[in-house]
Amino acid sequence: EIVMTQSPATLSVSPGERATLSCRASQSVSSNLAWYQQKPGQAPRLLIYGASTRATGIPARFSGSGSGTEFTLTISSLQSEDFAVYYCQQYNNWPPTLTFGGGTKVEIK
Amino acid sequence: QVQLVQSGAEVKKPGASVKVSCKASGYTFTSYGISWVRQAPGQGLEWMGWISAYNGNTNYAQKLQGRVTMTTDTSTSTAYMELRSLRSDDTAVYYCARDPRDTAMVTDGYYYMDVWGKGTTVTVSS
């Protein structure tokens, strides 16, 4: 099974600042990587797929990069509504599995 | 708009079964697959499996093989997830989510999910 490791577990950021979240895969997943945002009591929301393509309606301040085993989600200027937990998810089909990272909580500094 | 509406919360005893429904609207149900993902209290996300709404093909997470069954009813655009022999560690919020690929062209559920239901809380307690 491909293990996805996110860091840091918690990121404290002031509104307006830049946030950089990392996701590492235990083996290459090519660009088969998605990012989700989850707020308390809500379902996850798709932000990024294909490592760098924003989903419909996602603001341009969210960007994704990376390939292979190292990925980054960047929020260029944090807004109040961006404080949430972010999960990465790999969907490489070999080995056949789908796994999520453990999440990064972005909190107000 | 595209929507997935899930059934209400359930409380079950250990050893029982639960069946959660997920009614789709706003798109052609049989054109896409549905994945199921669960989240234990305070924990991360766990993929459970996938079903094609086109032909009913399924693939399940190895961990749940033998205990989970996913089905669809195309006449009502509804997907179902049944989990049997419930244990306390099955206590979680269960989400259905759409696989955005043309499901007639795919044979497995290893993909991202673009639309999610609001979740169904399943509590397993004696």
Image (spheres, coloured by chain):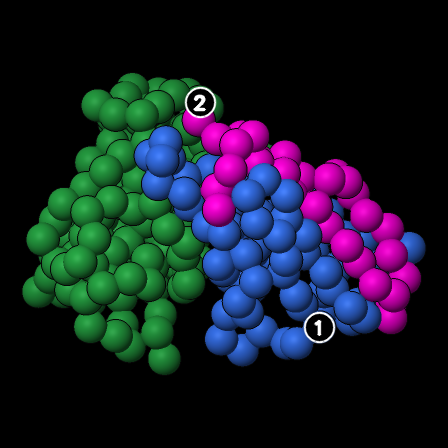
Chain colours: A blue, B green
Sort mark 2 into few (<14), some (14-19) or many (20+) by Cα contacts within 10 Å.
Answer: some
Say the numbered circle drawn on residue B19: none
Q: Work out whether residue B121 can be spotted.
A: no
Which numbered mark, 2 or 1, is in the foreground of this view? 1
**Residue B53 horizontal/vertical position (percent):** 17, 57
Residue topped by disc 1: A61
User: Quick check: A15 above or below B52?
Assistant: below
> Chain ID for label 2?
B
**Residue A6 horizontal/vertical position (percent):** 67, 39
Cα distance, mark 2 to mark 1? 41 Å
Residue type at mark 1 is Arg
Say the numbered circle drawn on residue B88: 2
Residue type at mark 2 is Ser
**Residue B81 horizontal/vertical position (percent):** 25, 43
Q: What's the magenta region?
A: A1-30
Q: Is residue A73 left or right of residue A67?
A: right
